[in-house]
Amino acid sequence: MKIRQNVKHFAFKAALTAPVVGVVANDKLVDMHTGIFLDRADEAHREERREHLDDFFDATMDTYLAALDYMPEAEAREITHVQANFDFYNHGWTEMMEFPADELEAHYDRYREFFADHGITIDDPLGEFTPEDGVAEAPSTPEKLDDPEHPHAEGGFADDVYVETADGEVVVGGQDEPEDVSPEDAPGVDPDEVEG
């Protein structure tokens, strides 16, 4: 899959793994991802999906942190996007998908070891990261699976993680983490909380 990676992503990684501001960064990322994907949803279905997406993306933050023990930042982040696309597919929310439905298996296979270690499948995209009280329900649109439209999907990137850098270059595998990244560089993180 093709994702972006810049200093902001590394700053969020630093913030998520830091005491105190980790919760702030988590909430900011959940809000950001819910907003991005609701904008891709059909307008008539946006509000009915909000609570589900908030819960789902909150759970993927735990996936991201666990994945960092296995792999670099770009791949750990891509895993959470793959989980989201499994969820979108399961609900028939094809207009929100980032890659075509026929690439689901290929994306699963690339991270099979991590997914198997954590009980994640295409049908159960959160696996052991499912919250104890579950994820809010939202209506599905299964009829869209008969002839899926993917206006936001980019196919042909299922064999590796492709990273678009800040200058628009696409590289395979991601970038090295900058040495001078601080949690306070993450949008929405208060520098006073980082120091306190």
Image (tube, rainbow, N blue to C red):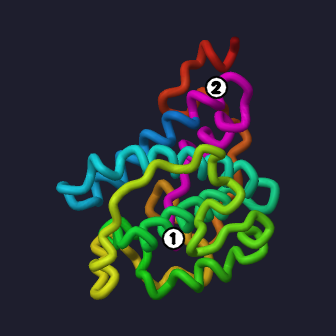
Q: Residue at x 80, y 61 (%)?
A: 70
Residue 68, position as x, y percentages in the image:
75, 54
Circle 1 SS class:
helix
Instruction: Please state if 133 lies on the left or on the right of 70 as rendered.
Output: left
Mark 1 and mark 2 lie on one chain; the one further toward the N terminus is: 2
Magenta segment boundaries in residue numbering: 1-25
Nearer the observer, 14 or 39: 39
Q: Residue furthest left?
A: 44
Q: Is residue 105 a member of the stretch shown in magenta?
A: no
Residue 132, position as x, y percentages in the image:
65, 45
Residue 49, position as x, y percentages in the image:
34, 52
How far apart marks 1 and 2 lie (CA) works out to: 29 Å
Circle 2 SS class:
helix
Q: Across the whole image, how many numbered discs are drawn on residues?
A: 2
Nearer the observer, 23 or 13: 23
- Residue 151 in sight from this viewpoint: yes
**Which mark is nearer the camera, 1 or 2?**
1
In this rendering, the answer to whether 83 lies above or below 103 is: above
Q: Is residue 10 a member of the stretch shown in magenta?
A: yes
1 and 2 marks in contact (CB < 8 Å): no
Q: Which residue is mark 2?
A: 21
Q: Which residue is mark 1?
A: 86
